[in-house]
Image (cartoon, rainbow, N blue to C red):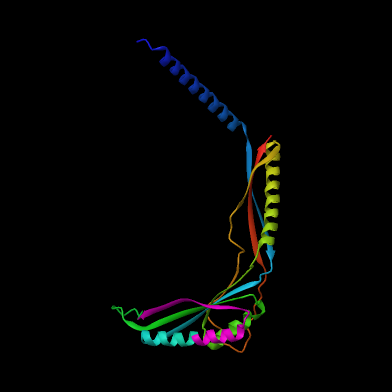
Amino acid sequence: MKLSPRIAAVGLALATLVAMLGTASAQSDANTFAVRTIEVDGNGETRTSPDTADLDLAIDTRAPTAEEAASNDAALATKVIDALKAKLGDKGEITTGGYSLDPEYDQRPNVTKPTIIGYNAQNSVTVHTGALDLVGALIDTAIAAGANRVNSLNFSVKDDTKARTEAIAIATRDAHAQADALASALNVKLGKVLKATTVSQERPIPIRMGMAMARSAANVATPVEPGQVTVPATVSLTFEIE
């Protein structure tokens, strides 16, 4: 079958285009494989003094009926909050957190049928403050008012920009040192940096102080030492090998 000159010209053009694309793709693949790289991750951290404290307290009550447990817990929670507000003043804020009301069952081995023997009501109160010197006194105040558990005490940094910048610089130097050592071991020379990224991490790792139960000796002041918080950073660098 004989093709018309126009159809033949179109076919030739298409064949030429396919050949050109194939050549370009081959050149691109060759260039891709020609770039050799070294990838490393560097780690760094800085330590800084905290300026914020979050104190989580619990009011835990038990009673024969749900209504009584809830009522007793609400009264104690109100008393604790009022005492904390008086102690804290305008140096922070107080919020109520979780609340639960659960039945308690007879757990004796000889009891075959689940039997409710009472109810447990729990209420939590959180104090957020920058007055770190008040934390110990706040714990004592809450316990004296009726709180019977300290769930946690966290110290953190409100603005960690400076500390994180320093940690990133340390992590970058660590990554570069690793790349130098790797290049030396492989007997190659490092070229330019092709890619640099920081790996997302949590904000300053808080110091967590947990207290399972309240102290029995209320006349002994609770000592609290915030210490320092650690601000971590990880940097990933990709170097070209010359």
Of all residues, the one furthest to the top in this rendering is 2
Quadrant for the N terminus in the image: top left
Residue 89 picture location, percent across and down:
61, 83
Q: Residue furthest front?
A: 6
Residue 189, by quadrant, is top right
Query: Could you say which is closer to the camera, residue 218 or residue 136?
Result: 136
- Magenta stretch contains residue 104: yes
Tell me which residue sits at (37%, 80%) in the image.
104
Image height of 237 relative to 66, above or below: above
Is 123 situated left or right of 236 in this image? left
x, y percent for residue 10: 44, 18
Q: Residue at x 69, y 66 (%)?
A: 48
The one of 191 and 227 positioned closer to us in this rendering: 191
Q: Looking at the picture, how far across and down is residue 161, in whole percent? A: 66, 61
Tell me what residue is drawn at x 71 percent, y 39 percent. Answer: 184
Does 176 sit left or right of 56 as displayed?
right
Range of residues picked out in magenta: 78-105
The residue at the point 45 percent across, 80 percent down is: 122
- Image quadrant where one finds the C terminus: top right
- In the rendered image, the vertical position of residue 211 relative to residue 218, given as above or below: above
Percent position of residue 44, x then y: 67, 56
Whether residue 200 is situated above or below residue 8 in the rendered picture: below
